[in-house]
Image (cartoon, helix red, strand yellow):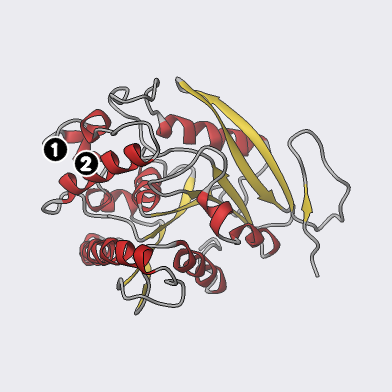
Amino acid sequence: MVVACVVLATGAVAAPADAATRTRFMTSGCGMPASPVDVWKRSANYKTVIALDGLRATSDMSGWRHETNIDKLADRGINVVQPVGGLASFYTDWDRKPGNKQDFRYRWTCRLDQIVRQLDARGMAAGRWGKYAIMGISMGGNSALTYAANHRRRISHAFSMSGYLNLSAPSMRESIKLALIDAGNEAGLGPYDADDMWGPPWSRRWVENDPFNLVPKMRGMTVRIAAATGAPGRYDVNAVTAAKGAPLETASAAQTKAFETHAGPNGLRLTTDYQPVGTHSWGYWRDAVWRAQREGWFRDR
């Protein structure tokens, strides 16, 4: 049995050669404050996946670490990288600083580029082609596919769970605008304005950051999409949370299926994971990652 060993940022603890280790490093630049990146790694692993958080990402740790056990993928052949932060950011470079209490402009595309370079320096570009996998939930699902499409040289696998993959659909841009307002207010920073991110709804940047429109750029990549129906299931023990998560998941399922319908005729082969029950919550996303692992999705093709 593989024994996990924790490694602090300030030093390493002796461990068996085949044990997974955890480290945290800081990344800075891009005009943003420094932010942490948590890494679970084993030297013999065959792939490294970057896991993006959702809309309400916090600055202390990723939701993936707080809510799931996917760090244990490192004991199953897959290094796990969890960038921390990105509240309401869509992991993208914003047009300008948001008009709330945040005093810097998001430049998360730049930050992810930096993280990839730092992973390279740590010898983590595992796999036959020396490329990474990237995955995310909800907001991070959109972002994973978008980043992958624009970084084919470094990304081979992209996985969206409950993402909104057709932002050009009716009412989607308005929905994103409302979601950013709500996330900022809940975090005590004041509303984020989607116009500060990609400009007004008619801006070309909305088109450029819509995974639906990026399908041709993903041809030949290993792409996976997942969503559930919104029907409550085993993880919906809180009625209020379930009531909030159900419509979000129903909408993401419709968006995900629209993306699938568009992908086939445009030459993008992908795998799907549609579940009969499940709302917009972490238990279902954790299970989706483990199903992908069991099916061998993370392996090079």
Residue holding disc 2: 177
Q: Is residue 227 left or right of residue 154?
A: left
Q: Is residue 256 above or below residue 216?
A: below
Which comes before the other along the chain, label 1 or label 2?
Answer: 2
Among the 4 quarters of the image, the one containing residue 225: bottom left
Say which quadrant the N terminus sits in. bottom right
Q: Is residue 82 above or below residue 19?
A: above
Q: Is residue 155 left or right of residue 212?
A: right
Label 1 amino acid? Pro
- The image position of residue 186, as x and y in percent, is 36, 41
Res. 254 visible in picture: yes
Residue holding disc 1: 201
- At x 19% / y 30%, what residue is drawn? 199
**Residue nearest the viewer, comparing 111 with 179:** 179
Among the 4 quarters of the image, the one containing residue 128: bottom right
- The image position of residue 299, as x and y in percent, is 56, 63
Res. 226 visible in picture: no
- The image position of residue 240, as x and y in percent, is 35, 64
- Mark 1 in CB contact with mark 2 (< 8 angstroms): yes
Q: Is residue 154 left or right of residue 143?
A: right
Q: Which mark is residue 269?
A: none
